[in-house]
Image: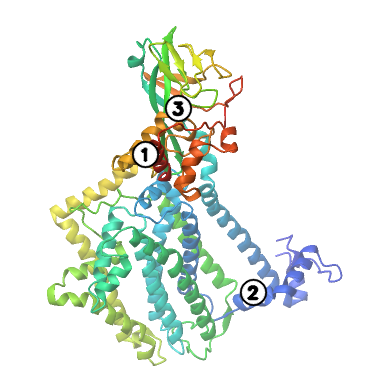
Amino acid sequence: MPTNPNTTAPEPNHPTAAARLTSWFDTRTGVNEILHESLDEPVPGGAKWAYVFGSGLLYLFISQVITGVFLALYYVPSADHAHTVVSYIVKEVTSGSFLRSIHAYGSSGIIILLVLHIGQTILYGSYKGRRELLWLSGCILLALMLGMAFTGYLLPWDEKAYFASAVGTNLIAEVPIIGPSLQRLVRGGDQMGTLTISRFYVLHVFMLPAMLIGFIAAHVFFFRKAGAAGPIKEDPIAPKLPAVPFYPKQVLMDAVFSISIIIILAAIATFIPMDLGPAANPADTHFLPRPEWYYRPAFQALKYLSGRTSILGILLPAILAVIFASLPFLDRSLERRPWRRPIVVGSFFAFLLVYVSLGFASYHDDYGDLGLAAQMRKQDQDAELFMKQPFIPEAAAGTATAALASADPKILKGRALFEANSCSSCHGEHGEGTPAAGALTGVSQKYTDAQLIALLRAPNAQMTNGGMTPVDLKDDDLAALADYLRQLH
Amino acid sequence: MNEAPAVANNPELEAPSRRSFVGALFAIGGAAVSLILAIPLVRFSTFPLRKVAAEDDWSDVGPVTDLASITAPTAKTISIEHRDAWQTTTNETAVYVLPPKDGQFRILSPVCPHLGCSVRWENEQNKFICPCHSGSFTPDGERIAGPPPRSMDSLDAKVVDGVLKVRYRYFRQLVATKEEMA
């Protein structure tokens, strides 16, 4: 610390360049006030490791935004390209597998942190004392995050993504009265398809993140308004314990926690990269659709419901969600010690226990049954095998000669004339243009039929200079050639 | 703790001093972590810039065994694959493979150096004739007569694992020397 500037006597008459810059910036932005406001927040009872989960969630969310934006550099939300581009990201692009893994495992990390954050809030009773809006904004954030996980899962369009989302969107149809219409709205039709991807993509990339940012801002605002609740013995409205500023000790703990998360994520992403299965094949009737691990318990619960009770699959979570969201309205006392609040704390842990058990039951069912276990292993092996294969680029639309097989005979005749008259030697096999002559694609937008035929008969000066010769053909051949040219794209 | 005297003289200095130290620690730690995380992001986003050089632009013409015994120029259709990120566009074009001389394959571009029409091999006349303006060339592609300013253009050829490969190129028309077009 010998070079610490504060240890030498300050010279107020000759401020350093850095000090003048800081002052210049502060007088125009008020940044010191903002820093003071955000870093000197009083924490009753001082810093604790129990308080790190909220910051951890914010940090992980920012990591998801950054990796997500970068992944969007290569992603195409369309059923015919989505799987190819994700495979390109994973197999070809440098660091692609790493970034995708961080993003995919990051969603699991957020779910784990959400449970820890909510668990801490319930255990510490820190939703009490004028914190209803703080709690409600948190509930909305939970729902939005689950929505992010659900919509993001489909985007790679591999087998497991496709089938898990097919099952997930099937559930929507169970909603009373509006279910079937809602399902069609979400899917963009009766079946899963390219419109489903674009809908999920828009939700995942634009709508849900925008709402998340808004509700995170509200959540932080409500938190600051109510103040940190402090330890369980603290009064949640009028704190009595000596307050310690958020900075530096709590900031340090939050930072250590957040950096540990990112290091763990990076390690998992490096050593166990997220796999990508073969492209979705809707015709595959053997595939066993399974959701991500955090949706497994809900998936398992649905197995126990059938026929008349199947409506419970929708109703039960809805009722639980409403009770959960109204917790600070139902539990009004200011008592925070968990052993004095057995109903709330007990119900939460009972729910967790049931949820985890359902998850285990789901895996047990799959791997306990020989037939299912074999199919599950086969699916894993298929994904493993696919990951080992080199990337195979996709043939661009329009180059496939197969498309011409079904074409109009007049266009086929035009194509034959195009080749026989050596047009292709300058304008390219499919009129896409070569260094020798321009592209003919899109001529239909520039010229009418009559203009096109006239130009072919008597090329203009620019065309002649480029080496174009007049096309000497019978009228109906010329018309066929014009027809062929007009459909080039 | 060499700032101890200063702190003793002016207790108010203590907090800012310790704070700026922790602040510096955060700044350095944060910068280090951000830098490490930024590396894959930079590599990810600059991938296409580093990829270009590796493109393979040789097209397969056919197995050498089929072509070794030809006695006249033979037209062969080749596919030129152009890679655009995760897509490929395939164009088909024709080239002429000449009968091998001293075991060396020679390949000619069918594009007439006059105005770019496709030159045809006329077996009965034993010469190449351009259908557009009747330019003619010997079986080796040397110019005989007509408006073409030079002989037919040869293309780079090589044999890899028994397969004849060609590197297809376009050349400037209407000039006396062979000039490759970008």
Q: Name the amino acid, label 3.
A: Trp
Badge 3 and badge 2 in a common chain: no
Q: Name the amino acid, label 1.
A: Pro
Badge 1 and badge 3 in a common chain: no
Quarter holding residue A46 = bottom right
Mark 2 residue element: helix
Q: CA distance from mark 2 to mark 1?
A: 51 Å
The image position of residue A351, as x and y in percent, is: 27, 76
As drawn, the label of residue A91 is none
Q: Residues within 10 Å of mark 3 (few under 14, many from 20)?
A: some
Q: CA distance from mark 1 to mark 3?
A: 20 Å
Is residue A71 shown to the viewer in this render?
yes
Q: Residues within 10 Å of mark 1 (few under 14, many from 20)?
A: few
A178 on left or right of A66: left
As drawn, the label of residue A35 is 2
Is residue B106 shown to the viewer in this render?
no
Quarter holding residue B92 = top left
Q: Is residue A126 above or below residue A482?
A: below
Mark 1 residue element: loop
Front one among A153 and A193: A193
What colour scheme governs how the chains and residues are painted in the rendered image of this protein? rainbow
Tag 3 near tag 2, CB within 8 Å: no
The image position of residue B138, as x and y in percent, is: 48, 11
| Pointer 2 or 1: first along the chain | 2
Front one among A48 and A33: A33
- Most extreme residue toward the top is B102
The image position of residue A308, as x and y in percent, is: 13, 77
Q: Provide the residue designation for mark 1.
A: A390
Tag 1 near tag 3, CB within 8 Å: no
Q: Provide the residue designation for mark 3.
A: B58
Label 1 marks a residue whose chain is A
Mark 3 residue element: loop
